[in-house]
């Protein structure tokens, strides 16, 4: 009997918990871009890029985000410790996938509207096994999104503290990262400050 290989399940993990301290405390998930909250654009990028299921990690103003954004197609996790920084949200997102049939997690940030489905699909297609570590690159520099095979999650979560997210893990495993150039299809800017709001339409 021929063994048919199943399509790998790459879950999207959207980190959308930030309180937008430098934006006057406006939660980033709700910043408006083309008439809809940023969090919806990010979910669409993950879905259209081939990720599923999509897990959204909320924190700041979580109830407001749920009320104002359409997240009906997503699993939503609220990170009660979001103020500790991105590390706690990454841990919450990976915890939410524990025990699922996902082979990898593609981690995406809510505040990078210049990164869309094409970049997501490229990084997703770098998946080879449950030990795959891949990242988008912009002119050779590592950026987001980042794909973590399921066998790496425990180590990634263990190192995710403060605002570092997976930075320390990625530094330590630099040689294992498959870099996927995306500068021709995406722009990797963050929406961090009031000046950056001009990047939103």
Image (cartoon, grey):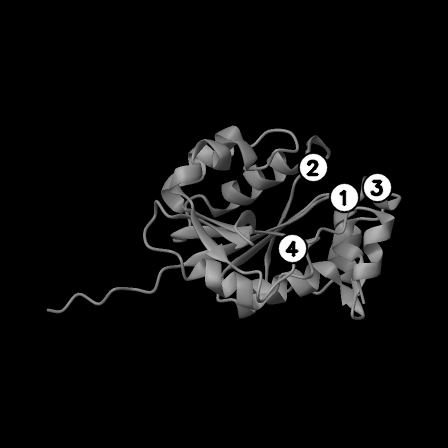
> Which residue corresponds to mark 1?
60
Marks 4/2: CA–CA distance: 23 Å
Q: Is residue 141 visible?
A: yes
Q: Quadrant of residue 152?
A: top left
> How far apart in space, not on screen, are marks 1 and 3 (Cα)?
14 Å
- Label 1: state its secondary structure: loop
Query: Which residue is farthest right?
Result: 24
Residue bearing the label numbered 4 = 188
Give the side of residue 85 with respect to residue 6, left or right. right
Q: Position of residue 153 (x, y in %)?
A: 44, 39
In this view, the residue in front, 103 or 21, is: 21
Mark 2 Cα shell of 10 Å, populated few (<14), some (14-19), many (≥20): many
Comes first in the chain, label 3 or label 4: 3
Q: Residue furthest front?
A: 139
SS label for mark 4:
loop
Residue at mark 4 to residue at mark 1: CA–CA distance: 23 Å
Q: What's the CA distance linking mark 2 and mark 1?
A: 7 Å
Q: Give the residue at mark 2.
A: 82
Q: Check residue 22 in the rendering and tell me which mark sits there, or answer none.
A: 3
- The crowding category of the residue bearing disc 4, from other C-alpha atoms within 10 Å (few below 14, some 14 to 19, many at least 20), is some
Looking at the image, is 112 positioned above or below residue 21? below
Q: Earlier in the sequence, mark 2 or mark 1?
A: 1
For label 3, count other residues whose C-alpha is less than 10 Å away and answer few (under 14), some (14-19) or many (20+): few
Of the residues under marks 4 and 2, which one precedes in the sequence? 2
Q: Position of residue 170 (x, y in %)?
A: 49, 37
Given contact means CB atoms under 8 Å apart, are the residues at marks 2 and 1 in contact? yes
Residue nearest the observer in this picture, 191 or 151 = 191
């Amino acid at each position: 009997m021929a063994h048919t290989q199943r399509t790998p399940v790459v879950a999207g993990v959207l980190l959308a918990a930030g309180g937008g301290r430098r934006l006057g405390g406006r939660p980033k998930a709700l910043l408006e871009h083309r008439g809809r909250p940023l969090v919806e654009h990010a979910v669409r990028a993950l879905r259209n890029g081939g990720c599923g299921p999509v897990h959204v990690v909320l924190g700041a103003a979580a109830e407001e985000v749920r009320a104002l954004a359409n997240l009906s197609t997503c699993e939503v996790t609220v990170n009660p410790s979001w103020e500790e920084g991105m590390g706690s949200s990454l841990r919450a997102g990976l915890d939410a996938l524990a025990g699922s049939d996902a082979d990898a997690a593609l981690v995406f940030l809510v505040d990078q509207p210049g990164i869309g489905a094409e970049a997501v699909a490229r990084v997703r297609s770098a998946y080879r096994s449950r030990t795959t570590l891949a990242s988008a690159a912009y002119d050779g520099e590592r950026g987001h999104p980042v794909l973590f095979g399921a066998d790496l999650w425990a180590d990634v979560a263990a190192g995710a503290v403060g605002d570092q997210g997976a930075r320390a893990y990625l530094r330590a495993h630099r040689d294992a990262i498959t870099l996927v150039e995306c500068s021709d299809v995406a722009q990797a800017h963050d929406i961090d400050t009031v000046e950056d709001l001009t990047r939103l339409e």
